[in-house]
Image (cartoon, rainbow, N blue to C red):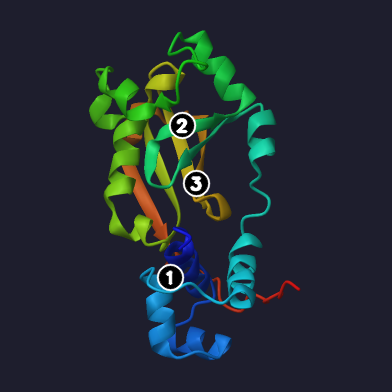
Amino acid sequence: MDSSVPFLVRRARLLLGMTQTEFAQLFGVDDGTVSRWERGKLHPAPKMWRRIRNIVLKESSALDIHLVRASPVYKCVVEVRDLTKLVVFSKGMIETIKAVGALELDDKPFDIAEHSRKSSYYEVSSGRALEIIQADTRWSRGEIAYAEMHCVSASLGDVWADAIIAPLLDRYAAIIEFAPSGRGAAEGFWVELIGLEDMCLTGLPIVELE
C-alpha cells in the first residue's frame, strides 16, 4: 500500500469540494470504497489512482524541487510528517544560513526545531510555529491548503519573518517560503491554517491520464 494514498485521495476529494458520496459517484464506486481509500485500507485501481493523482498534481505542478534549489529567495522543502526537518534548500537560504553560521549543510538535514530551541526567541520562533501546524490533525489528514505564520527565524539570524507553508503532494512533502518582515515584533507571533473548505476550489476540470 502506497502510504500517500489516504492523504492524496482525501486531498483530491476536498479540492473538488465533494462529499464521500459525490466522490464515489464520480469514480463509479460505493461510499465504503472511498472511505477505505481514505483510511488506507484499500488502494484505488490503477486507472482511478492515476486520475486521483492528476486532480492533485495539477494544483502542485509549479512547485518543483529543482526550482526550489535554484531560487534566490528563502525557500526549503520539508517532509509532511516532520515539518521541522529541512531536506531541500534554496540557493538564497543556503547563503543566508551559512552567513549567520547556523550550520554546515553537508553534515545532516537541518532541524529547525532543534535550532530554534537554542534561541532565546523559541516561544515566537519558526520552529514552534511549525510544531503548532504539525500538531493540528487537519494537516496530517490533508485538509489544509496552506498555513501562514509571523515568527522569528533563528536560522536567518533571529529576524522576524513572514512565512507560508503548503504541501507538495506528489512527494508527500511541503514547501516553506520565508521573507523578512517589516512589521517585526509589533504584530506578535501568530499561525493561521487555511483549510480547503475555506477556499473556492470547486468546479476544477478533471483531466484523465491515459
User: Which quadrant of the view contains residue 184?
Assistant: top left
Q: How many marks?
A: 3
* Residue sitting at x 38%, y 27%: 111
Mark 1 vs 2, N-terminal side: 2
Label for residue 86? 2
Most distant residue in the right direction:
210
User: Which quadrant of the view contains residue 197?
Assistant: bottom left
Q: Residue beneath label 1, please?
A: 197
Please tell me whether residue 140 is drawn above or below residue 50 in the rendered image.
above
Residue 71 in view:
no
Q: Is residue 48 left or right of residue 194?
A: right
Asked which secondary structure carries label 1, the reply is helix
Could you say where residue 8 lies in the image, as x and y percent from the top left? Answer: 50, 64
Q: Callout 2: few (<14), some (14-19), or many (20+) C-alpha neighbours within 10 Å?
A: many
Q: Marks 3/1: CA distance?
A: 21 Å
| Callout 2–callout 3 Cβ contact below 8 Å | no
Q: Three-letter amino acid code at disc 2?
A: Leu
Asked which secondary structure carries label 3, the reply is strand
Residue 190 in view:
yes
Could you say where residue 3 lies in the image, as x and y percent from the top left? Answer: 44, 58
> Considering depth in this image, is 23 or 144 the residue closer to the camera?
23
Mark 2 vs 3, N-terminal side: 2
Q: Marks 1/2: CA distance?
A: 28 Å
User: Which quadrant of the view contains residue 154?
Assistant: top left
Q: Residue beneath label 3, please?
A: 173
Q: Three-letter amino acid code at disc 3?
A: Ala
* Residue sitting at x 41%, y 63%: 143
